[in-house]
């Protein structure tokens, strides 16, 4: 008996034996010079670009597929993609794209105008669950409607898209129903990448059904883990084991400069600490969304480095003009002077934030360098309140969200407490209110019932001012801009800028709008944050894009 | 025995029905809904309403539950809202990982815990006994995720002996006919893959098995101490039987009855502990899948996944109860 028990102990000690003779595979990723292993936070949802809206899906899809218009790596500057040039009609509703020649999809299908139009028509013809925001979010946002989507879904009346015609092999003419200024910027978005029409048909990209749960379940093999994903990009889809790894291989027939890397492997690792440890051991070569508290650890390491993603978000304090006395400009200016924005950014963003002075980051066209600024000045705030004829302190209901961390607001409570303290010194008396982020807080903010002040933020979708100013400020109730002359002027100006086809004129219009917004202190932006990525030092060439349009083609491993 | 087994299997029906109601109500009590999770902060009222209607979330609860029961009756556990894949497919892909980890942790806990408990009882009051007591208390007190992080930091980051994440090195090409990576390596003759899979199991199995190890060793110790003082054991020793015969035929066998109950209960503990362990080690099993589903408010996954785990726990407990009969014929014959 004792022998048996002793054998059991020995067997259970086997793990230690394994560890002692372990092959040390932990660092193998770091050593493979032609393969990059990237620690993603999750698997992509699907490898059909038209049906994605989350960051991890963007990251993978953007290596397989390409858009007509691209961005210079690491910037928002528009450059030729699958289209070498473009022009618009005098009326601004027709866009002509001259396409790149000699390009083939990964399955050998030629890329041409017919392929472009097949994709645009496919999206326009989405029906049922495919047409809902849960599936084709960005098509809904940009194009607004579909041909015959089904009950309850936006139809032709709301659609921006009219049609697409192939003029010869290499000219695609896209007609819109109205002028849409952000069109070109929107065409850089991953969901508008061009997939092989042959593969879309062959692998049943649009075969699906609505299950009893109301979930759209794809029945074809396009974009699925055991299926196919066929674009024109510098990497081809090889295999995908859900929860474990997704492998792309270099496209050696790529039309442009071939990738340095032979393979890119994405490993889903949900836990941030686990991603950091995997980087430290060399099991992965890099990851995104580094926690602020880990940055010092990474910088101290001789093998690791931090890369900054240019800011593409804004954290702000909403001012609801529907709540008296915040309909008074003097009071709103007092709020702006009473919020200690530099203090909050310095204390709670671990060096990853910059003070914001307007509702969009500097990388977006239309950014104004001449908006009025409101330095923290409690005395000035008090003087403004007295000038407004108010007795101090002025009571103000200030809301903050619980159960949430956002890139622009990692710890809302910290921000709130610091802002409340500075407002209390500036002639206000803050009444604190809070609610869980979903659904209560966002619902209240949307309806304008989250007090006079509340904490919110926004991350842009594409490099166009409408993506920020439209996305944030068209929520009229939130800012109390309904039935308000300030709102009337603002929305008129935003609509005019949206309908302007000439980009330089648009930029000038948005600069004026930004000046107006801050002259009227419609809200108080306070931070743009720079998300961080971490890599092993031998990974070079990675240029983080503000719009998550990172390209792995230009990345290599040295040493 | 057969009647006992059939009765226990029939009991599964009301148990699972009750559990399905509990899970159904619990997931809907979580703040937020799949609509907001799918759309993120861009969720506007109109889009949320559209998705809620599509998913039937505005129907009365009893209607939603009936619809759920109807799909269950077809053997369908639903479709994941986040991934749009059948829940059964995701379970089939992920369950082998959890089984492999749970079995490894269980083997570690049993093969170390029982001998430790046995020798602690045999050396009652001595240094070994007291040391094992302290270690057990530590094992039970340390949260699994914390232990996992510490193990990774020591053995993966600092020493570089073992991997910190996943089930297999990405540079190893291997076939996976069964989904159990160690077994697959053996079956396909890919010894490198089998060994690599074993390396990937070591740290998560130790982390996950730490609490069961502590519990099993303490229960074994207590049980052995109890049985050692029974009359029949004293009689056997008085008859002059060798100590090892007394230990194996009388002490060990009878002491294992309560231990086997505890081992059966550990299955539930191991499966729930797997959620945290798999997350810390990025082990692609049911645990990480359910954890993501909670964040995404993925109702079909939560409902189907939890129900599936519950079935496993109940069936394993049934098997444990049946094993009593093997260990002690008096229990087997009691029904006659």
Image (tube, rainbow, N blue to C red):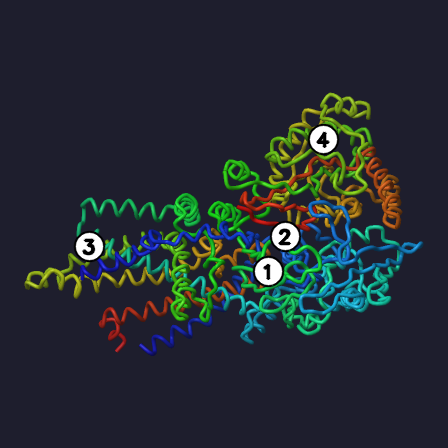
Above-or-below relation of B329 to B165: below
Mark 2 touches mark 3? (CB < 8 Å): no
Disc assigned to residue A471 = none
Q: Is mark 3 in CB contact (under 8 Å) with mark 1?
A: no
Which chain is home to disc 2?
A
Query: B289 or A110, which is in the foreground?
Result: A110
Label placed on residue A552: 2
User: Going by the picture, which residue comes out furthest to the right?
Assistant: A90
Q: Which residue is mark 1?
A: A248
Q: Which residue is mark 4?
A: A395
Q: Position of residue A522 (x, y in %)?
A: 79, 37
Tell me, yes or no, if residue A413 can be seen here.
Answer: yes
What chain is tagged by disc 1? A
Q: Nearer the viewer, residue A93 or B235?
A: A93
Q: Residues within 10 Å of mark 2 (few under 14, many from 20)?
A: many
The residue indicated by pointer 3 is: B225
Q: Earlier in the sequence, mark 1 or mark 2?
A: 1
Whole-number angstrom distance, CA of label 3 to CA of label 1: 60 Å
- Residue A198 drawn at (x, y percent): 71, 72
Q: Is residue B49 visible?
A: no
**How many neighbours does mark 4 have within 10 angstroms: few (below 14), some (14-19), or many (20 or more)?**
some
In the figure, A81 relative to A375: above or below?
Answer: below
Category of crowding for the residue at label 1, using alpha-carbon neighbours closer than 10 angstroms: few (below 14), some (14–19), many (at least 20): many
């Amino acid at each position: 008996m004792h022998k048996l028990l002793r054998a059991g102990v020995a067997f259970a000690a086997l793990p230690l034996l394994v560890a002692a003779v372990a092959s040390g595979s932990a660092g193998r990723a770091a050593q493979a010079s032609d393969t990059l292993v990237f620690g993603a936070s999750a698997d992509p949802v699907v490898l059909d670009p038209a049906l994605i809206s989350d960051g991890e899906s963007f990251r993978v899809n953007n290596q397989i597929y390409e858009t007509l218009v691209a961005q210079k790596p690491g910037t928002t500057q528009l450059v030729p993609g699958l289209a070498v040039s473009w022009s618009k009609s005098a009326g601004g509703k027709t866009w002509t794209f001259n396409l790149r020649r000699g390009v083939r999809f990964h399955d050998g299908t030629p890329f041409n105008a017919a392929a472009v139009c097949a994709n645009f028509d496919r999206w326009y013809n989405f029906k049922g669950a495919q047409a809902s925001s849960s599936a084709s979010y960005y098509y809904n946002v940009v194009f607004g409607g579909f041909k015959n989507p089904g009950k309850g879904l936006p139809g032709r009346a709301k659609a921006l898209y009219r049609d697409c015609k192939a003029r010869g092999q290499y000219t695609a003419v896209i007609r819109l129903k109205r002028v849409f200024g952000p069109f070109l910027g929107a065409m850089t978005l991953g969901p508008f990448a061009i997939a092989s029409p042959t593969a879309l048909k062959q692998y049943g990209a649009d075969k699906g059904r609505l299950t009893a749960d109301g979930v759209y379940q794809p029945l074809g093999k396009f974009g699925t883990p055991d299926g196919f994903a066929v674009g024109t990009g510098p990497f081809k889809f090889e295999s995908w084991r859900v929860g474990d790894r997704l492998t792309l291989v270099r496209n050696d027939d790529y039309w442009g400069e071939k990738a340095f890397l032979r393979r890119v492997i994405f490993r889903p690792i949900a836990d941030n600490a686990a991603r950091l440890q995997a980087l430290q051991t060399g099991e992965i070569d890099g990851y995104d969304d580094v926690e602020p508290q880990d940055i010092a650890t990474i910088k101290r390491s001789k093998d690791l480095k931090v890369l900054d993603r240019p800011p593409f978000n804004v954290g702000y304090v909403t001012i609801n003009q529907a709540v008296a006395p915040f309909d008074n400009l003097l009071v709103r200016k007092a709020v702006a002077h009473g919020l200690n924005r530099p203090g909050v950014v310095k204390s709670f963003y671990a060096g990853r934030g910059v003070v914001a002075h307007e509702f969009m980051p500097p990388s977006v066209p239309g950014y104004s360098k001449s908006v009025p600024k409101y330095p923290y000045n409690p005395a000035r705030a008090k003087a403004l309140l007295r000038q407004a004829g108010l007795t101090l302190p002025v009571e103000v209901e200030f809301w903050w969200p619980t159960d949430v961390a956002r890139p622009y607001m990692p710890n809302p409570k910290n921000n709130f407490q610091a802002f409340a303290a500075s407002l209390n010194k500036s002639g206000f008396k803050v009444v604190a209110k809070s609610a869980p982020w979903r659904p209560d807080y966002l619902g209240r903010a949307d309806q304008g019932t989250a007090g006079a002040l509340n904490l919110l933020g926004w991350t842009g979708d594409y490099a166009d001012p409408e993506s920020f100013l439209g996305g944030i400020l068209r929520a009229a109730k939130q800012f109390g801009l309904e039935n308000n002359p300030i709102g009337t002027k603002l929305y008129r100006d935003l609509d005019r800028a949206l309908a302007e086809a000439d980009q330089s004129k648009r930029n000038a219009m948005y600069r004026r709008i930004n000046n107006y917004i801050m002259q009227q202190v419609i809200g108080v932006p306070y931070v743009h944050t720079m998300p961080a990525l971490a890599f092993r030092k031998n990974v070079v060439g990675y240029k983080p894009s503000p719009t998550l349009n990172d390209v792995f083609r230009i990345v290599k491993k040295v040493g | 025995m057969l009647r006992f087994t059939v009765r226990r299997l029939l009991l599964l029906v009301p148990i699972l029905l009750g559990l399905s109601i509990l899970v159904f109500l619990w997931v809907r009590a979580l703040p937020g809904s799949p609509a907001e999770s799918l759309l993120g902060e861009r969720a506007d009222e109109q889009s949320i309403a559209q998705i809620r209607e599509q998913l039937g979330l505005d129907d009365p609860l009893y209607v939603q539950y009936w619809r759920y029961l109807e799909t269950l009756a077809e053997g369908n556990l639903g479709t994941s809202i986040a991934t749009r894949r059948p829940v059964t497919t995701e379970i089939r892909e992920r369950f082998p990982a959890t089984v492999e980890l749970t079995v490894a942790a269980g083997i570690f806990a049993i093969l170390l815990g029982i001998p430790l408990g046995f020798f602690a009882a045999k050396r009652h009051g001595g240094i070994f006994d007291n040391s094992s007591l302290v270690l057990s208390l530590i094992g039970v007190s340390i949260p699994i995720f914390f232990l996992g992080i510490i193990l990774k930091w020591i053995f993966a980051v600092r020493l570089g002996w073992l991997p910190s994440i996943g089930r297999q090195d990405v540079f190893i090409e291997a076939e996976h006919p069964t989904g159990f990576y160690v077994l697959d390596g053996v079956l396909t003759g890919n010894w490198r893959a089998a060994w690599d899979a074993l390396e990937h199991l070591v740290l998560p199995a130790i982390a996950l098995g730490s609490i069961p190890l502590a519990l099993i060793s303490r229960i074994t110790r207590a049980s052995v101490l109890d049985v050692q003082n029974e009359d029949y054991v004293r009689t056997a020793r008085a008859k002059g039987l060798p100590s090892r015969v007394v230990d194996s035929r009388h002490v060990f066998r009878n002491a294992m009855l309560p231990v086997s109950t505890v081992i059966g209960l550990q299955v539930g503990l191991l499966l729930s502990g797997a959620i945290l362990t798999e997350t810390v080690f990025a082990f692609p099993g049911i645990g990480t899948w359910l954890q993501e589903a909670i964040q995404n408010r993925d109702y079909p996954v939560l409902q189907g996944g939890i129900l599936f785990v519950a079935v496993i726990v109940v069936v394993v407990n049934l098997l444990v109860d049946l094993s009593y009969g093997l260990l002690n014929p008096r229990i087997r014959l009691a029904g006659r």
